[in-house]
Image (cartoon, rainbow, N blue to C red):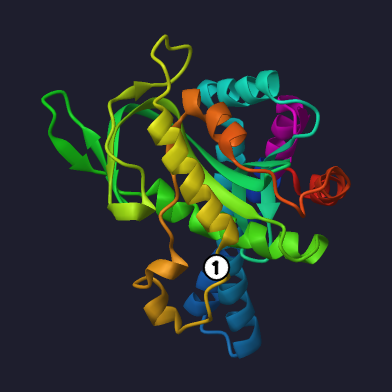
Amino acid sequence: MRVFGTARDIRRRARRRLARGGILLSLGVLLLLTWLLLHYFSTDSFLAFFLAGFGGILSCAWGIGSLRRGLAMTATPTAAREVIRTLAGALDDSYVLLRQVSLPPSGAFADAILLGPHGALVLSLQALQGTYLHRKHRWYRLTGDGTPRLLDRSPTWDLTRPWKSARRLVREYAVAGFPVSAAVVLASGSLAESEGGPTTLPEGPSVENGASSQAVPADRVTAAAERALELAQARPAPQRSRFLRRSVEADHPVFPVITGSEVVALVQALPAAERATPELVTELADALRPRVG
């Protein structure tokens, strides 16, 4: 498997983002201080007053966003790297993996995009500690006594933007019908249970990530592959009011959730797509390479 976005490249790009974020944040703070001085001395220049305040807020927002992204890139967990090494050791050169892909115009980022005979698979690599279960978009962490505690974020919900952006980007570079699916991968931790009807995985035993001697449950992988295939064949949802989108399940599908030990079996279970020819996969990988990092 060919991999674009080595650890060295990602660290170098992360340092650039951190430097850019620091400069923007400093500039924003300076503009806000200027705005306060203009306000204190009651200047008559409304334009200078407006530009200092608006520019300061905008620069601070961009700077914080760049700093957060840079820190996220430098904190790539060891478990996530293990998943990538597992894929690289099991898949041949017909597959291409792109790490830390920027997906405009929404500004979304994908932890990894795997291109191959199956099409494109957007992966969200989650390095979580402990045992987890999810009910559609609600994620819970099990405490020591088995009590579920609701998480303040949902990996399946967060994957919606990267998946949609990847589909839009693929349509710009590739022919229509190139399948794009997505999955959440627990790079560490374990998956105790999943529930929510046909859009999520069935209930199953806890599966630990890593070099586990426990066999991967075939029904879990099959269910994940079937759900991934449904997502790849789904048509884009029609545009709706922004106030209604969060309540429409078609706009936020529930993605399959697997562990790191199941990711290779999932990829191998996905059927080959007619449009995902080796030439098109290579062309799409070359087009996406500038967006890595």
Task: Answer few, some or many: residues within 10 Å of disc 1's Cα (few below 14, many 20 plus, some between 14 and 19).
Answer: some
* Quadrant of the image occupied by residue 94: top right
Left-right relation of 263 to 215: right
Task: Give the answer, above or below, for where 40 lies relative to 107.
Answer: below
Location of the C terminus (image quadrant) = top right
Magenta stretch contains residue 203: no
Q: Which residues are magenta?
A: 1-17
Location of the N terminus (image quadrant) = top right
Question: Can you see residue 28?
Answer: no
Identify the residue shown where x is 82% and y is 50%: 284
Residue linked to disc 1: 57
Residue 42 in percent (x, y) is at 51, 84
Instruction: Tally the marks.
Output: 1
Magenta stretch contains residue 14: yes
* Quadrant of the image occupied by residue 9: top right
Secondary element at image label 1: helix
Pick the front one: 117 or 189: 117
Residue 73 in percent (x, y) is at 61, 37
Identify the residue shown where x is 12% and y is 34%: 147
